[in-house]
Amino acid sequence: MAADTILEIENIEVIYNKSVQVLRGLSLRVPRGQVVTLLGSNGAGKSTTLKAISRLLSLENGELTSGRILFDGQDTAGEEPHQLVRRGLFHVMEGRRVFGDLTVEENLTAATFALSGRGVKHSGFDQVYSYFPRLHERRHARAGYLSGGEQQMLAIGRALIAQPALILLDEPSLGLSPRLVEEIFTIIARINRETGVSMLLVEQNAAVAFAIAHYGYIMETGKIQLDGPTARLMADQDVREFYLGHAGHGGERSYRDIKHYKRRKRWLS
Amino acid sequence: MTDLLFLLEVSLAGLGSGALLSLTALAFVLIYKATRVINLAVGEILMLGSYLFFAFAAGMGLSVWLALPLAVAGGALTGAVVERGLIRPMLGESPISVFMVTVGLGSVLIGLVELIWGTDPRSLPPFIANTPVFLGEAYVSRKILVAFLVAAAVMAAFMLLFRYWRGGVALRATATDQAAAYSCGINVPGVFSAAWTVGCGIAAGAGVLLGAIGGISPSMGVFGLSALVVVIVGGLDSILGALIGGLALGLIQSWAGTYLGGEYQGVVTFGLLIVALMVRPYGLFGTHEIERL
Ligand SMILES: Nc1ncnc2c1ncn2[C@@H]1O[C@H](COP(=O)(O)OP(=O)(O)OP(=O)(O)O)[C@@H](O)[C@H]1O
Ligand SMILES: [Mg+2]
């Protein structure tokens, strides 16, 4: 494997509860320093892919039954999730998953455990606060009381604290207003540019994902269907029709938005 | 006037045993917060702690100041072994089966202690003087006062640790969302293990204090049931609930025992439990839904 690859997934299969197969031979690659996006419709297996990478799958009774995942050149099989985080692989989960009872600052403190045993000095929370000034204003507030956008900022802020080599981002646009989506994606792109951290970005909002990603994969029912540099994908007729909504699929789009809204409510309750 | 003085003395005694209830309740809370397990064997770990102290101080003739930390360490070690050997392999099993395992563990501990030390009650070598203390005009047993002060100091220390120490943040994060805690690099199994170790160590220490006041016997673990009432009323995941609930129940038990008669203590305790559960099913200070057993 080339040294310029931070993540390499080879033909993985994932089964939940020893019965439901969700991933069927999925492969993808994230070059070091790049933003790669993984798109697909509801239930395609995007989140499952990320959970397989971060090994949080075991908490949901899911199992990687074949294939392998190389992070920074090393097979991740047998590693515990927190050990992977300490090696520099940070998963920002779908639905933000901030610790609602903890303050913003305590949420960031929780992420400092990612630095354990790495010999990196953590630079305080200043870097997070400079990317997200709003978090600084609300640093003593309970995370459960933050707005959806602020919670997403906090979720990304926790990743920054961990000083990772790779961030897995699961639908950061979920349930946010278009204006906030734009603001947050602008910052995500800046973080990639300024810190050089690689990112694997899962999205349903293909337009914003393409705007910041260098390369894209499109998956359906557990497999990659199509991949290529974002410019090429954006020119593809099918992609334009199904993912960018350029061919009068407005009805389906708004249905998705409603589903998003419902899911957002579920996460917050 | 003397009646009032008597009430004051009864109340002070109640606060003393209430502080021990709080301390024991803290053991329940720590373990429940981290692992969502109601460890019914907390009472028996408490009993084991007092017997370990007895063995080290009376049996081996060690100084009580050495026997005390050894007893606490013995309880802690038991907790660590139980978590690793019995509880962790059951991760993901239904709460009721894990609960039953702790019930079984309690019986095993009672059996072991009876095998080694017999069933007769014993008294611990005295390490707190018998001379009473007077707060103003009110008489307080010195043992109860010492127990109160130690319990209060330990509770205060834990409240501060929870709030300001990084490890406290790890425990609270794990309690809120295990997957998210993992994703922040927190060693979640390590938190489980630490909670059981520290929780059982606290229970063992409470056992030594309780034994110093009232003597020890293999059945003294029933004290754990009162502490369980405290945490169910106060909220299984709330340290503050354990503190306030313990003191309150200690007072109430002391009043009921004095003014109604000793046989009413149990009735009042569990009557209180039923009323509290009807008013607030999640406990007065609890935040999370309790897994219904
Ligand atoms: N813990 C689980 N147990 C059983 N099945 C699951 C579990 N998690 C996900 N699945 C199933 O796996 C499939 C893929 O789910 P996944 O969450 O990976 O989809 P996704 O692409 O992230 O979808 P979305 O865009 O809605 O988030 C779905 O059919 C889902 O029902
Ligand atoms: Mg998903």
Image: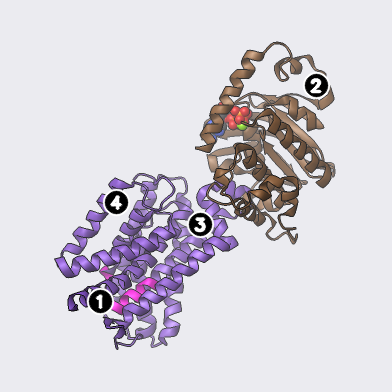
Chain colours: A brown, B purple
Q: What amino acid is found at the position of numbered circle 4 in the picture?
A: Ala
Q: CA distance from mark 2 to mark 4?
A: 61 Å
Against A262, residue A160 (above or below) is below
Disc 1 or 4, which lies upstream in sequence?
1
Q: Chain of mark 3?
A: B
Q: What amino acid is found at the position of numbered circle 3 in the picture?
A: Phe
Circle 2 or circle 1, nearest the eye: 1
Q: CA distance from mark 3 to mark 4?
A: 29 Å
Q: Residue B223: horizontal and vertical position, in percent?
A: 29, 66
- Secondary-structure class at tag 3: helix
Disc 1 or 3, which lies upstream in sequence?
1
Circle 1 or circle 3, nearest the eye: 1
Q: Which mark is residue B9?
A: 1
Badge 3 crowding class, 10 Å Cα cut-off, few under 14, some 14 to 19, many 20 or more, is many
Q: Chain of mark 4?
A: B
Q: What amino acid is found at the position of numbered circle 2 in the picture?
A: Met
Same-chain check, marks 2 and 1: no
Quarter containing ligand 2? top right
Disc 3 or 4, which lies upstream in sequence?
3
Q: Which residue is mark 4?
A: B276
Q: Is residue B150 left or right of residue A197?
A: left
Tell me the quadrant of the picture where the N terminus of chain A can be found.
top right
Q: Which residue is mark 3?
A: B192
Residue drawn 75% across the image and 39% down it? A188
Same-chain check, marks 1 and 3: yes
Circle 1 or circle 4, nearest the eye: 1
Span highlighted in magenta in the image: B205-219
